[in-house]
Amino acid sequence: MRIVPLVDPELTPSSRRLAWLATLPTGAPAGSAFLRLYVKAGQDHLAELDLHVHPAEQRKGVGSLLLDAAVAAARQERRRSLTAQAEPGSPAEAFLAARGFRTVLTLTYARLPLAGTNPDDLKAVVQSPHPGYRLVTWEGVVPDDLAETFARSRRAMDDMPMDDTDYGTVTWDVDRVRQAALTIGKRGETLHTVAAVAEPDGSIAGFTELVVPGDGKGDAQHYGTGVLPEHRGHGLARWMKAEAIRQARERYPDLEGLLTDTADSNRHMRAVNDALGYLPTHRMLTLQLDL
């Protein structure tokens, strides 16, 4: 068995990746591992592992060899924490737990079948009064007149429940929010944002983001949804998300569903999703190795 380091050309402003390929004596691939190294201040202590072994080669030590290579590289890069994901009760969870990883976060994934949503119910939520606030929407990069306040509103995600994950902090500025939207566009997808604006100062109090496939078919993916602490308790998250659903139905008649994932400990956002008709599909664990 050989573990071959690979060159991964994928570079982003926030991370870079190392990669390894496990090969049999015949040269056939047996497994792979990718190690994402976060480079932005506030998260440059963190590495994320994605490891896969061919079913025919499992329980032969391939995963252990790949994991050893990734852990050694993470330590060489002076990382403090290494995370990986696995389904509850899966062989992957047992493999990681046996090698010192501990469960630090449980996520519930959910899907909203758009065909089952009631337009009148959505309209009632969207048109319900929210004194002191109004909704704005945009597609792609945030408009210049909202850019500064939108970047500041990203701190709404700072206290997003991450349980025991050594997640660090993500610092957003105007350049970063613009670059994120441009990156989505380069992938051929469309970013839709709905934001709640506080009156009378016109600052953004909260936002929700939806990424739609370029062909407008299949399932779209929710990205961030957050409300600034000083504006919570007014039902803004449900209001914004209902408008995002309404727009998705109207603009993309071939879109089938909307996907989201929420920490099990985030009871408020889970309640919002439940009220809007999102149905749980599966759960995933984040496991962490302290280096």
Image (cartoon, helix red, strand yellow):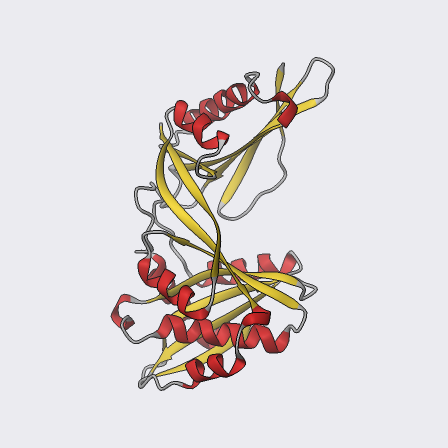
Does residue 208 lie above or below 118 as drawn?
Answer: above
Which image quadrant: the C terminus? top left
Q: Residue furthest right?
A: 26
Does residue 106 lie above or below 252 as drawn?
Answer: above
Q: Give whichever of 120, 260 is nearer the camera.
A: 120
**Image coords of residue 281 (percent x, y):** 50, 53
Residue 230 placement: quadrant: bottom left
Q: Can you see residue 78?
A: yes
Which image quadrant: the N terminus? top right
The residue that appears at 42% across and 80% down in the rendered structure is: 125
Q: Give whichever of 213, 56 is nearer the camera.
A: 56
Left or right: 116 with respect to 280? right
The residue that appears at 38% across and 67% down in the rendered structure is: 272
Left or right: 22 with respect to 119? right
The residue that appears at 34% across and 49% down in the rendered structure is: 169
**Image coords of residue 100 (percent x, y):** 37, 25
Q: Give whichever of 283, 286 is nearer the camera.
A: 283
Residue 88 placement: quadrant: top left
**Image coords of residue 93 (percent x, y):** 44, 32
Q: Give whichever of 276, 287 is nearer the camera.
A: 276
Q: Can you see residue 143?
A: no
**Image coords of residue 75 (percent x, y):** 41, 25
